[in-house]
Amino acid sequence: MKKLLVLAAAVAIGVPALMAGAEVTGKITLKGTPPKEIPIGLDPLCGRLHSEPVTTQHYVVASDGGLKDVFVYIKEIPGGKTYTPAADAKTPELDQEKCLYTPYVSGVMVNQPFIIKNSDPLMHNVHATPKVEGNKEFNVGQPVKGMEYKASFAKREVLLRFKCDVHAWMFAYVGVMDHPWFAVTNEKGEYKLPPDLPPGEYTLVALHRKAGESTQKITVADGDKKAVNFTMEVPK
Amino acid sequence: MTRSPHNPALTAYAWLTALATLILICFGGLVTSHGAGLAVPDWPNSYGYNMFAFPLSQWLFVDNEFAGNGIFYEHSHRLVASGVGLMTVLLAVWLWFKEPRRWMRVLGICAVLAVIAQGVLGGLRVTLLSNTLGWIHGAVAQSFLCLVVTIALCRTRRWQDLATRPAGEGRAVKVALVTSISLIFLQLVLGAAMRHRHAGLAVPDFPLAYGEWWPATDATAITRYNRLRLEERAANDLEALDIHLHMAHRLNALLVLAAVTTTVTLILRREPGKGPRRGASIWLALVFVQAGLGIWTVWSNKAADIATAHVAVGSTVLALGVALALIAFRRYAPGRIDMSADVSAGAARPSGPLPA
């Protein structure tokens, strides 16, 4: 009997918690044949870190058309609430590994500190090139392996570019968002927004640096599990 | 202290400084061509080291291998610039003590001030992360080269002994030269602006531009251009201004070709001296080479070596144009003493101060 009461209490507390907010997932598929990526002429030192030729990574497409590195986000959250990252949220990282930025596309929240680190046994510099007023451009050297730099940006900016001026082919993009409901597609082209999207009507945006931008209107209720897929086209 | 306008060592040194300046411009061209202007994020230090004490192992040979990266291009540019700065100071000091013409001594001082200002501009471009300062830095470099070439040319015996012609005969040549030089300078400023916006190749085809004679620059078109291009390097997104600058550079190239062709035709018809005629012919040839390099830059997708050669030849074309103009303005200067008779008769050249 006691066990039953405990179970009932757990359900009574847990169900509403599970019901709070919606979960949006989906897949981005690329239609058309993307142009061939360009081989990167690495300098001798970076060349040592790769056994295979390196190319640009504008279109990373799975065999079924799933498109990687699409930044998917809720365009606007009504209500004017200020969101901050969860206290236990992992600090995002932008790594310089084998003379490439990893990940190529990522996201952070406004004023959320994130770490840019050098995992290479050679010099890099980290040069953020924001366009939005209020986000500060910076250029810092990371000459030694293991060095870290903590950065944050004050304003929303989709997408903010990082580059390395030592190695001109190194660049990456970070979406700086004023709410937490964003994600980046993986190798299969799949994404999953954080699970507690408040009920309401939203515009869901899928943005790819080359394939462009696509939007869909969605309506979600508490506890919804919504799959929203996009098809993007290779521009002509 | 003896001051003489005919000091071959000083004249040769002035030419050497001009050559070093041209080499420095080439190094600057390599920096922008490789997108390495900010590869060394601090200034006047380099990664915290005194610029001159930055270990070779950090920028030239890393682990016994040639670095060949952005730090190499940027740091070597700084070192060559320091060398040119030192050479300029030495030139000014030498002129101060050995050059009889006051205005030449003043030019030497101006060169020192210019090279210092240029160095500070380059440094501020790094510390302030300013593309605009980078563009000004590129334009001042061309002006500085012209200044040093002026000093070197005015040191030469040939220039000093140049026979005069009636001023009226040279009016057309002088106007044509000033027009050509102005257009060339404008062309170099446009080029510097394009390079320092760091947007890569704004128009990827030639002779057409995005398949048109004049490309669209509305927001939809710009978005399309940005999506179509696959950047190999971290180029800024294209804006309409990048397309306008690129197209203005193409149009002005046609004007430069027409102006220089006309000017050289005039010089070949009217100029009696073999040297200036040869110089003019080389100038014309270089302008066409430069146009070819411009086209090649587009067709090579702005390959760094081709783009740098385009910068170097552009600077040479400007400097040669300025030299020809100085000759013309001296040749056809109103009221100047004609020394041609003395020179042709092999008489002793004047050893005292020259007319100012």
Image (cartoon, rainbow, N blue to C red):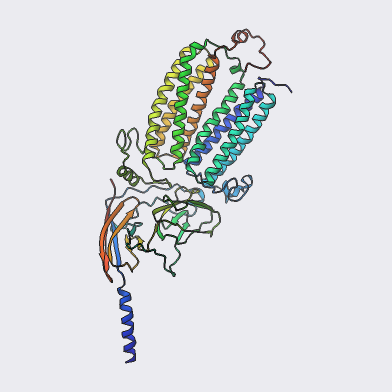
Q: x, y percentage for residue A186?
A: 35, 61
Quarter of the rendering occupied by the C terminus of chain A: top left
Considering every residue shown, the one lying at the far right of the view is: B1
Give the quarter of the figure containing the N terminus of chain A.
Answer: bottom left
Question: In terms of image quadrants, where is residue B331?
Answer: top right
In this rendering, the answer to whether B212 lies above or below B322 is: below
Q: Is residue A84 left or right of residue A27?
A: right
Residue drawn at the location 54% of the way across and 49% of the way down = B41
Q: Nearer the viewer, residue B204 or B186?
A: B186
A197 with respect to B140 (left or right)? left
Question: Could you tell me residue B217's position as x and y percent?
Answer: 32, 39
Report if residue B193 is visible in the image: yes
The foreground one among A26 and A133 is: A133
x, y percentage for residue A63? 30, 57
Q: Is residue B163 above or below residue B304?
A: above
Q: Please identify the residue farthest to the bottom as the structure is shown.
A: A1
